Amino acid sequence: MGNDDEGTNQGSYVNTGGGFERKTRYIPERITRDGRDGFPVEPGRYRLVVSRACPWAHRMILTRHLLGLEEAIPMAVCGPVHDADSWTFDLDPGGVDPVLGIPKLKDAYDARPEGYPESGVTVPAFVDATTGRVVTNDFDQMVKDLVTEWSEHHREGAPDLWPEHLRDEIEEVSAEVYRDVNNGVYRCGFAGSQEAYEEAYDQLFSRLDQLEQRLSGRRYLVGDQLTLADVRLWPTLVRFDAAYHGHFKCNRQKLTEMPALWAYARDLWQTWDFGSTTDLEHVKAHYYATHRDINPTGVVPKGPDTSGWSAPHGRESLG
């Protein structure tokens, strides 16, 4: 799913066995070079709506940043804490997006001809500024389309994040990371039974151990270059100590206690400027204030200390 509003109502996301189940139905339309769904690539036409708190939205922010699509694809940023039914534009003057003229992202979902029958208003979402309606919220396809369909508008020297000769391996690694890590932290945090929690916890740290080993001798997850596999993993890592370790009970280790993963995360923060796309204050405000079934008081922690992100990572020699 492309948002983090799970947890507002336990019965809506836990199955009969107490396991967390993510909603995975998304709007299938795409923005493509040939415009086959009625939405051709057109710089300035679409507004990418995100929250800096959401890891799924963060992947779109990172990809847009890496490919130099900031001018071609304007971005609207929702506040970190949404209301009962929608992400909101409470960071903008008057609480209204200055281009779309709406206070809630839900308004753009409701503007679709058939409305939006699915539950949950998710980010990231592409909104057609000419009509004010959401085009798509399929975060996985959206990231790939930034690479393939928007290539004519990439910056000079932009990295090839989804090279054809590595795609099968990228997809394989990304699927494992999604299942056990990206979604795994949620399966821990929103588990409705001890058994479901412990199963998710064991799968999460088993996968992190494998990634720790994989990254101890190589700089990136796939091949010898930055790819969408790294863009998939990193937003979970950067949130780990600030949110998942305590709030979601993923507390066997902190990221800072996993040497290869910690160095890898710092490498991307520094070398590829991932740090400029990150707002950990938004992350903490969202997780601790939104998921009141987990944190009833809504108190947001002051920590952790983030100064270590600028420490040398020592991974320049790895292939």
Image (cartoon, rainbow, N blue to C red):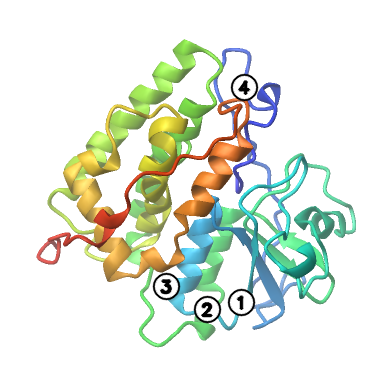
- Label 4 belongs to which residue? 14
Give the residue type that dot 4 points to.
Val
Alpha-carbon span between mark 2 and mark 1: 6 Å
Give the residue type that dot 2 points to.
Leu
Q: Position of residue 203 (x, y in %)?
A: 36, 27
Query: What secondary structure is found at the residue carrying circle 3?
Result: helix
Q: Earlier along the polypeptide chain: callout 4 or callout 3?
A: 4
- Label 1 belongs to which residue? 73
View extreme (right): residue: 113
Query: What secondary structure is found at the residue carrying circle 2?
Result: loop
Alpha-carbon span between mark 1 and mark 3: 13 Å
Image marks 4 and 1: residues in contact by CB distance under 8 Å: no
Give the residue type that dot 1 points to.
Ile
* Residue in the picture at 40% in, 60% down: 228
Q: Position of residue 272 (x, y in %)?
A: 32, 70
Quadrant position of residue 214: top left
Q: Is residue 22 above or below residue 196?
A: below
Mark 2 neighbour density, 10 Å: few (under 14) some (14–19) many (20 or more): many
- Label 3 belongs to which residue? 66
Mark 1 neighbour density, 10 Å: few (under 14) some (14–19) many (20 or more): many
Alpha-carbon span between mark 2 and mark 4: 38 Å
Image marks 2 and 3: residues in contact by CB distance under 8 Å: no
Q: Is 126 displayed left or right of 38 in the figure?
A: left
Image marks 2 and 1: residues in contact by CB distance under 8 Å: yes
Q: Earlier along the polypeptide chain: callout 2 or callout 4?
A: 4
Q: Position of residue 141 (x, y in %)?
A: 57, 58
What quarter of the picture does the C terminus occupy?
A: bottom left
Q: Say which mark, if any, is on residue 69.
A: 2
Query: What secondary structure is found at the residue carrying circle 4?
Result: loop
